[in-house]
């Protein structure tokens, strides 16, 4: 009786033995004919992906704007996945796994920051030709971005507001609001390892935004006091700082893109625009990792 090949197993076109046979049959050249859509198109859902850029005006720069938005949404999602994995690894006292997750996210953050190049040439005139088509749409309403902010400790129940009418999105954000973030998990790990993290930073109402504490700075200062290469907690602190710096770089490039493309006009999302964004950009991420440096 014929059996259906298991995906990835022998007999499946993706299996290593079959790939070697096929390459030999092809004389080393790629396969040129399929009796269905090319498997790449199917696997990557490419037809669906390419059907999702729907400019609302005839302004060509609108396509760059839409693609920049979509690329960043995908990267927000990927970074969230890596940060959650890093947070869970810290909870499990697995610092090497946390470092691996942060490192993967750091590379993705670099791509994210570079994505601003996609809209770097947008002029106020070009933007003006499609800005009205956005209506009240604003990146401020991105729930994937909000997840990242929550993981960074910038908690706010009010900012779940735009998703009131989307029950699943709202429930997911409410769970994230109530859970410790990445930095909280790092501080809890330091505490378990005997560093003097104040009790109020180890157990607290996680739905409140993180605020800096001199006791946390002292705890990190103890970590920095041992800079031998084997100190994995120092490596963790530096990876968190790499993460923090890239968050600020993204915010700063956003601010510059806004300043270039629309100056100080109010935002489509209802804020004052530049002024509101500048305040967020100024906020240090993981503040004690920055402030402790003055004392070293
Ligand atoms: C160059 C074009 C852009 C302009 C002029 C612009 C403008 C703004 C403004 C004024 C705000 C403040 C909220 C508001 O009133 O709308 C904002 C927020 C935001 N924008 Fe953009 N934006 C641009 C491109 C993008 C892109 C491509 C993304 C990628 C998804 C993005 C993501 C965000 C996010 C996540 C926020 C919320 C930031 C926070 O909560 O701190 N923006 N944007």
Image (spheres, rainbow, N blue to C red):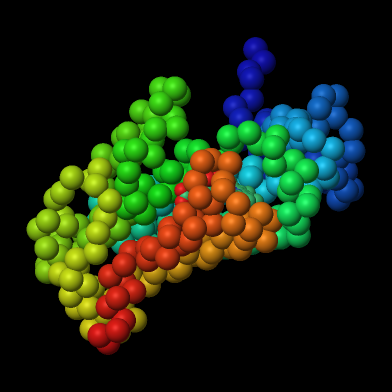
Quarter of the image with the C terminus is bottom left
- Where is residue 59 shown, x and y percent of the image? 82, 42
105 relative to 163, above or below: below
- Residue found farthest to the left: 199
**Viewer-closest of 150 and 106:** 150
**Residue located at (19% from left, 66% from top):** 213
**Residue located at (59% from left, 36% from top):** 137
102 left or right of 39 in image:
left
Observer able to see residue 239:
no
- Residue found farthest to the bottom: 296
Q: Splitting the image into 4 quarters, where does residue 237 fall?
A: bottom left
**Viewer-closest of 173 and 77:** 173
167 left or right of 125 in image:
left
**Residue located at (80% from left, 35% from top):** 57
**Residue located at (78% from left, 43% from top):** 129
167 relative to 19, above or below: above
Q: Splitting the image into 4 quarters, where does residue 200 fall?
A: bottom left
**Viewer-closest of 182 and 279:** 279
- Where is residue 87 shown, x and y percent of the image? 33, 52
Quarter of the image with the N terminus is top right
Observer able to see residue 208:
yes
């Amino acid at each position: 009786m014929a059996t259906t090949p298991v995906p990835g197993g022998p007999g499946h076109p993706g299996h290593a033995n079959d790939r070697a046979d096929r390459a030999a049959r092809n004389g080393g050249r790629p396969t040129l004919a399929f009796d269905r859509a090319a498997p790449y198109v199917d696997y990557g859902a490419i037809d669906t992906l390419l059907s999702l850029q729907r400019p609302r005006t005839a302004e060509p720069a609108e396509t760059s704007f839409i693609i920049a938005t979509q690329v960043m949404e995908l990267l927000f999602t990927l970074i969230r996945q890596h940060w959650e994995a890093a947070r869970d690894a810290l909870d499990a006292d697995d610092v090497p796994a946390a470092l691996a997750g942060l490192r993967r996210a750091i590379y993705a953050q670099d791509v994210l920051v570079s994505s601003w190049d996609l809209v770097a040439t947008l002029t106020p005139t070009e933007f003006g030709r499609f800005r009205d088509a956005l209506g009240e749409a604003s990146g401020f309403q991105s729930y994937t971005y909000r997840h990242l902010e929550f993981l960074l400790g910038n908690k706010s129940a009010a900012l779940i507001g735009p998703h009131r009418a989307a029950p699943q999105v709202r429930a997911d954000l409410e769970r994230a609001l109530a859970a410790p973030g990445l930095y909280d998990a790092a501080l809890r790990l330091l505490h378990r390892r005997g560093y003097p993290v104040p009790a109020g930073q180890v157990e607290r109402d996680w739905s409140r935004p993180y605020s800096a504490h001199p006791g946390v700075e002292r705890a990190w200062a103890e970590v920095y006091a041992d800079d031998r290469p084997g100190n994995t907690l120092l490596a963790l602190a530096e990876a968190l700082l790499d993460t923090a710096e890239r968050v600020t770089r993204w915010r700063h490039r956003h601010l510059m893109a806004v300043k270039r493309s629309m100056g100080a006009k109010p935002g489509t999302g209802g804020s004052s625009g530049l002024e509101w964004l500048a305040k967020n950009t100024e906020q240090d991420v993981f503040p004690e990792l920055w402030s402790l440096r003055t004392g070293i």
